[in-house]
Amino acid sequence: MAKELLKGNEAFAEAAVRAGLEGFFGYPITPSTEFLEYMARRMPNVGRAFVQAESEVAAINMVYGAACAGKRTMTATSSPGLSLMGEALSYIAGTEVPAVVANVMRGGPGLGNIAPSQGDYNQMVKGGGHGDYFPIVLAPASVQEAIDYITLAFDLADKYRSLVFVAVDGNLGQMMEPAELPPMRELPEEPPEWAAYGAKDREPNRLSSIYIDAPEEEVANVRFVKRWLEIEKNEVIYKEYDLDDAEIAVISFGVAGRVCSSAVRVAREEGIKVGLFRPITLAPFPKKEIAELSKRVRRILVVEMNSGMMLEDVKQAVAGRVPIEFYGRMGGMTPFPDEILDEIRRVDQNEGEIVDGMERVEWLERLEERIERGE
Amino acid sequence: MTMQKVNLVYERPESLATTTTHYCPGCTHGTAHRLVAEVLDEMDIREKTIGVAPVGCSVFAYDYFNHDYVEAAHGRAPAMATGIKRVRPESTVYAYQGDGDLASIGMAEIVHAAIRGENITVIFVNNAIYGMTGGQMAPTTLPGMKTTSSPNGRDVEDAGYPIRMSEMLATIDGASYVVRRSLHNPANIRKSKKAIRKAFEVQERGLGFSIVELLSSCPTNWKLTPVQALNFIEEQMVPYFPLEDFKVMPEVKAIRV
């Protein structure tokens, strides 16, 4: 199939349909709404379920129901909506049913704004709901990647009976760019054996996140952790650019990572030995790969569209081997390539040590200067 | 189980699991479970039925029935049932909910399931109290009724009046069958069963949203003996929550059970 000019949210929605989505449940929220609108047209046309729920709370519980029924199901939302879904996300994880949530992130906290952000990193990567569980989080940086990783999200969800987030930066949902959609997949004929679909000629299937006896809950928790270790071993995805001979590594994900790749290209033309490491799976986080990387470079620059959430995970992986600097924009602001280029040049010239925590203090000084200049 | 079935007049419905329940002595949840199970057996739909259990005293309902079951978050059973029914329209899907679950935390989900005319059945057990958490005031607690969170009796000036869910749901166009029954004596239990049968028949015919509210006892948290508790239903609850058919669509009226 040839590449077409596709609008982010609509392309992701179509990719989900082609991946075998049989139930979409959502609630309108900017900047994810096109997802819902597309599904409202598309799902009935292919004879599949679509419901505009009364709230995000109801939407995710409909997803929970459809997941228990053994069908591929998802919702799409944006940050405040994800907060409302927290409870059911935990139930989904506790019941070990597969579900996909696309979160088209926006500026926050609170009502915030509808501009692009990566401020939900912690919420998704660290779980989003109560209790001890581990969702998979995928962070695409282009419309094509979002299409590819939504498909992968369903496959991983099924493979591990896991909750999978696709972290879509607001700009990605709204932008149009050339991309290719995968072919339509056949729907499975048989339900998964664990699902609730009617106990004919078998014992009833009972799906629940309750383990009222603490020892039994602990056994379930052990199973979750072991499964997560397996996921960490098998499913880490990342991309590297110009890192072979790099002395400086930029680490950045999603749209911020894409902006960084432009800046890295220009810096290379200037003769700066810099490369980019872009995690695709924010969870499982490419810990080992970043640890290895930190043995080859003399300095690391982390760039995010938040206050340094992934920064903490990078620090843990790097374990003090090399100085780590940080640059971020917040509140719905997207950095320009020039800003990142300035940062790369500065980092290249900086030979000093950085006391842990000072990278944020120094970043805030530079950021405030920029804000004062109206940039 | 090898006993010969000679003149067998009473046995455990196949739709009930062969297990003991955790319900308190005198609680009518067991009666409600049995009625649902008898109806599923009689309609021969056990093998395609998926139940949705609530949070509350009937949180373990999924263990007490012998068919597929899922366990919802508090109040969300109608949303979960919606998700199941929409992707498996050939299945029979019902939610089993208490009054705290359905009429307080889950108010939005039950109302909107009715608005959409979801083709599901809801068994709504109203015992005017939060049982599982130890007897707090529910949205259906009667005026003046003492609970652990209304120790001086429900003060309507402060806590408002009890909600009559069936009356409210009956105003919704999407609801096809909305009735209230009671479990306080054999005659009313018979009527309850008939209503439950009708509610499932509504779903089997694709006629939309059906709900049967069942007035139920909670001797433990009402601090009454089982017999006193049944009398409490008759004398105190029925006058406030009348046993009526609040909404019966013309197509539903034609169903004979």
Image: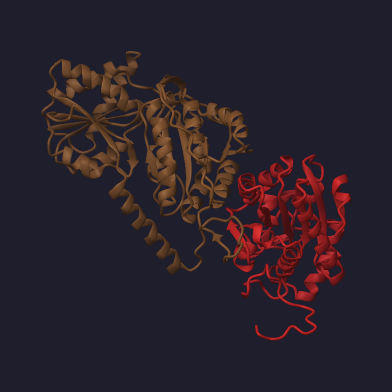
Indicate the quadrant where residue B48 lies: bottom right
Residue B162, position as x, y percentages in the image: 77, 52
Residue A309, position as x, y percentages in the image: 33, 37
* Residue A288 in view of the camera: yes
Q: Residue at x 80, y 70 (%)?
A: B230
In the rendered image, which quarter contains the N terminus of chain B? bottom right
Q: Horizontal placement of A344 versus A367: left or right?
A: left
Taking A326 as reference, is A272 above or below it? above
Comparing A282 with A305, the one in front is A282
Residue B53, position as x, y percentages in the image: 62, 58
Which chain is red in the rendering? B
Comparing B255 with B179, the one in front is B255
Q: Horizontal placement of B41 versus A199: left or right?
A: right
Q: Residue furthest top?
A: A373
Q: Residue at x 65, y 71 (%)?
A: B23
Q: Horizontal placement of B233 versus A202: left or right?
A: right
Colour pattern of the rendering: by chain
In the rendered image, which quarter contains the C terminus of chain B? bottom right
* Residue B164 in view of the camera: no
Q: Residue at x 78, y 44 (%)?
A: B175
Which chain is brown in the rendering? A
Comparing A302 with B71, the one in front is B71
